[in-house]
Amino acid sequence: MNKDNVKGTMDDAAGRAKRQVGEWTGDTKTQADGAAQQVKGKVEKAVGNVKDAVHDMNKGNRNDDRRDDTERP
């Protein structure tokens, strides 16, 4: 997990709360703002997941390279 995942989770949760308050109060602007913040959070989480996947893939490649060096005669 990286800062994008954390920030995305926070924005998603805040957006859900804001959207819900807007629904309870009948405030369509607050609903729209909350929905937009939720989308922003989901995008940030997706970016964080991609970064994690790339990091894990690179980490695996570095380990494979080291293994190759030790296996050569």
Image: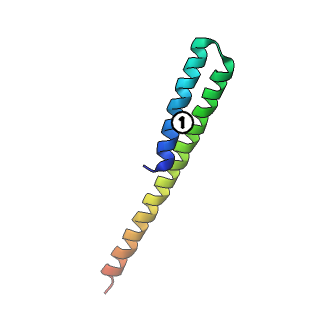
Instruction: Find residue 38 and report its image quarter.
Output: top right
Q: How is the image coloured?
A: rainbow
What residue is disc 1 on?
11
Nearest to the observer: residue 59 or residue 14: 14
Q: Position of residue 4 (x, y in %)?
A: 51, 47
Q: Position of residue 14 (x, y in %)?
A: 53, 30
Q: Position of residue 60 (x, y in %)?
A: 40, 64
Amino acid type of the residue that numbered disc 1 sits on in the rendered structure:
Asp
Q: Does 58 sit left or right of 26 as displayed?
A: left
Q: Does 18 sit left or right of 53 as displayed?
A: right
Q: Quadrant of the C terminus?
A: bottom left
Q: Does 43 sit left or right of 63 as displayed?
A: right
Q: Is 36 located above or below residue 57 in the figure? A: above
Mark 1 neighbour density, 10 Å: few (under 14) some (14–19) many (20 or more): many
Q: Position of residue 13 (x, y in %)?
A: 50, 31
Where disc 1 sits, the SS reads helix
The residue at the far bottom in this view is 73
Q: What residue appears at the point 56 percent right and 18 percent down from the top-left corner? A: 21
Q: What residue appears at the point 43 percent right and 67 percent down from the top-left corner? A: 61
Instruction: Find residue 32 and report its image quarter.
Output: top right
Q: What residue appears at the point 55 percent right and 19 percent down from the top-left corner? A: 20
